[in-house]
Image (cartoon, rainbow, N blue to C red):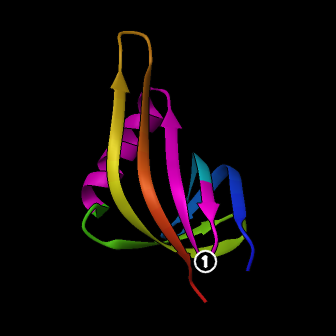
Amino acid sequence: MGSRCLKGRGIILGGRFENWIYDLNGDETLNGFISAEGWEEAKLMNAWYEINKDTSVLAMISDESFVIRLMGIECDESGHYSSSRIKVVAKCDF
């Protein structure tokens, strides 16, 4: 399998659609980030990360099923802007 690059918006987690941005690259294992922008979306992502940070999570990304591991989160909260970005490792769930 050659190198892949998945970039876009929209992830299904546990049957729930999240309008989060994904940017993943790799061969059999994809590395990258999922991110959220805006106060409400970032707050939701932060809470989701805290609940799931010690487990693998099943996700639908770009019409493919992946098992993702959460490797860490970065948060940016300023007076006018908020965003969160989670480092992930994703493997296809065959």
Q: Position of residue 25 (x, y in %)?
A: 62, 59
31 part of magenta stretch: yes
**Rendering coords of residue 43 (x, y %):** 36, 36
User: Which quadrant of the figure contains the N terminus?
Assistant: bottom right
Query: As displayed, is residue 78 above or below residue 8?
Result: above
Rendered residue at 34%/22% (across/down): 77
Q: Assess whether residue 37 is covered by the magenta stretch.
A: yes
Answer whether residue 16 is visible to the viewer in this image.
no
* Placement of the C terminus among the 4 image quadrants: bottom right
On screen, 85 above or below 77? below
**Left or right of 20, for residue 40:** left
Q: Residue at x 46, y 65 (%)?
A: 89
Which residue is labeled 1 in the image?
A: 28
The picture places residue 42, in percent across and down from the top left corner, at 42, 36
The structure residue drawn at horizontal position 71% and vertical position 58%, both measured from the top left corner, is 5
Q: Position of residue 20 (x, y in %)?
A: 56, 46
The residue lying at 33 percent from left, 45 percent from top is 73
Front residue of 14/63: it is: 63
Which portion, as a residue range, is magenta? Answer: 24-51
Which of 16/8 is in front? 8
Residue type at numbered disc 1: Glu
